[in-house]
Amino acid sequence: MNMNHTPIQWSSKRKELALLVVSLSVLGVTLVWFFFWVDPDRRGRLAWWDRPVEHQPITGEQQTKAPTVLGPTASALASTASTDPKKTEVLAPESPHFEVGQKCALCHAESKAAQAMRDAAGQSVAPYDLWQTSMMAQSARDPYWRAVLSAEVAATPTQKAHIEEVCTRCHAPMATPVDTSPPGQVLAFLQAGAERAHLGLDGVSCTVCHQMTDEGFGADASFTGKFKLNTESLIYGPHAQPVTMPMQRHVEYTPTHGPHVMQSALCATCHTVITEAVTPDGTPTAQAFHEQTPYLEWRNSDFNDERESPASNARSCQSCHMPTTDDAGQPIATNLAHNPGGRDFPFLEPRQPYGRHTLVGGNAFMTRLLRDNAEALGISAPKAAFESSLTAIQKMLREQTARVTIGDISRQEQKLRIPVSIQNLCGHKFPTAYPSRRAWLQLSVYAADDTLVFASGRFNSQGQLLDAAGNVLASELAGGPIQPHVDQIQSGDQVQVYETVMGNTEGRPTFYLIHGSTFLKDNRLLPQGWQAEHPDGSATRPAGTNEDVNFQAGSDQVLYEVPVPGDGPYRIDVSLYFQSISQRHAAELFTNATPEVATFQKMYSTAEHHPELIDKQSFLFRD
């Protein structure tokens, strides 16, 4: 057998034909790949290259778990979690186009196969992953909000439609406009089966803030959730000349340069709440009440960067709550997205500024409660994400809010005179916004053998303030007295509590927002640079401070006069604590018999109530 092969002789035409076939094959494969890659309708048919490597948005089937039975509200809320996240709302042509955050997660969540959305240390800073455990993301599932809203309706049923409409503007904006719930119900439009419940339950989602125009920014007409959204499906961001094709093809939005998303006035649309006071019998008064004013407080401070000549420490809301630096303080520059398959887009370049969508404030208590009741509330965010949020919240509270300082201590006969100063580091009051928040000073004096000599501001395991004998102060109980602002403390029954107490139209304390017409007490620490004569001075002025000359812009000082039994030395410990829901507010809320209050009370009863430590100082005094 002849094993010799005669080499094939290729003619030039055959070579050209073969080259043409190869070229067409490569082109065909490329076109098919590109076609399926950019067209979401064909995703899944050739899914092996388009399947996210690490992150996969949670489907309705994955979210559906047997909820813990915590009353009708919790059960109804958990059942709405099974809504298909791929569902797209059909709206009238002049209505905004909304999508749930999981749609955005397709390209804006972490992928292990991509370098996009990472800081210099390689840590993920993907927007969806940071946002998902924020109070913004959970604003409509928040059981405290639901309980308070139900209590407001129960107290003033004639204002039910108004209460639901105003409150959902910012807590469930993608469900608005809303129809009033049927008799005996509240928030029916967020229950299972409601047409837009899946959108409303996504809280303050990506397509709310990023579709907001700058129309009316900074004006009263934009406050209390009266922001304006574009109806052209434009997604605003801070970067010029954005790449538009992927977002247009996958979610039918167009990325658009909109530097106004970096302005504090955007946050102000929901974080400035001006309500109309209603009498206890439900009669409107047309009297404006500045219930929550962090933006106005910021505008009347050295932190205001809207001024023609801002101060050196001027900063926007976003610079603290959505920092453009990493944990090491270095500016973040990174690609803004990866492709739907979880890999880097080859045509994108790193951009900056890049804001971390942590959106943290001081609400560690509610973040823990949401984490611990995630299944009952229909929350799909992982526990690890909540832990990261808690770490960031506590870091902010301990590093960026306030400082306490022990001044020069003196002794007069059998008394120690201990001046304690508190400095506000925030760009607004501390605490700020919702009236349930409070901070207080705790001062303890110990003898040389560690025997407790004096204490003010101590608390029990439930976070309730105690008197000198260790009993719960009457001011912690529903219907009790109010702790007044003080500039001197001489008894363990006295506590310096920084808080607001609303007054109704009859001048009596009220814990119903809709009845609030003024503040009987507002001794929250003013921001640095606050001025009474500023245009926002009247809306942010303190109340009940009794002309305390030591209560000034940016600081306060309290003098403790402590009786001591003999010679020292004495150790003085001073701490500043914070609660996002004071025990008094909780006690007042629990007097209302609604299903939503009962649901929250059950969660509250098993929660951790230790207040957040803001700062602490110690000093050893020797005669």
Image (cartoon, rainbow, N blue to C red):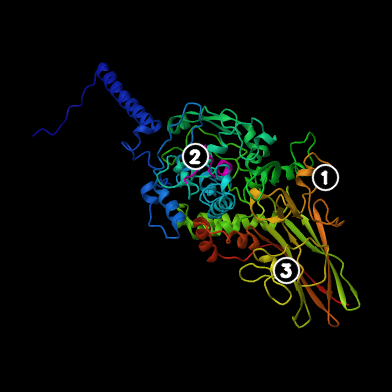
Looking at the rendered image, the disc whose residue lies closer to the viewer, 2 or 1, is: 2
> Under tag 2, what secondary structure?
loop
The N terminus: image quadrant: top left
C-alpha span from label 1 to label 3: 30 Å
- Seen at 61% across and 39% down, the residue is 225
Q: Amino acid at mark 1?
A: Gln
Q: Quadrant of residue 409?
A: bottom right
The spot of residue 490 in percent (x, y) is: 82, 71
C-alpha span from label 3 to label 2: 46 Å
The spot of residue 110 in percent (x, y) is: 48, 46
N-terminal of the pair, mark 3 or mark 2, is 2
* 323 or 498: nearer the viewer: 498
Residue holding disc 2: 179
Residue 339 versus residue 76 in the image, above or below: above
Residue holding disc 3: 457
Neighbor class of circle 1 (other Cα within 10 Å; few <14, some 14-19, many 20+) is some
C-alpha span from label 2 to label 1: 42 Å
* 87 or 503: nearer the viewer: 503
Relative side of 337 to 79, left or right? right
> Under tag 1, what secondary structure?
loop
Any mark on residue 85, and which? none
- Seen at 47% across and 37% down, the residue is 99
Q: Amino acid at mark 2?
A: Asp
Residue holding disc 1: 531
Looking at the rendered image, the disc whose residue lies closer to the viewer, 3 or 2, is: 2
* 151 or 526: nearer the viewer: 151
* 260 or 587: nearer the viewer: 587
Neighbor class of circle 3 (other Cα within 10 Å; few <14, some 14-19, many 20+) is many
Which stretch did the figure color magenta?
Answer: 164-182
Verify CB contact (< 8 Å) between mark 3 and mark 2.
no
Q: Amino acid at mark 3?
A: Gly
N-terminal of the pair, mark 1 or mark 3, is 3
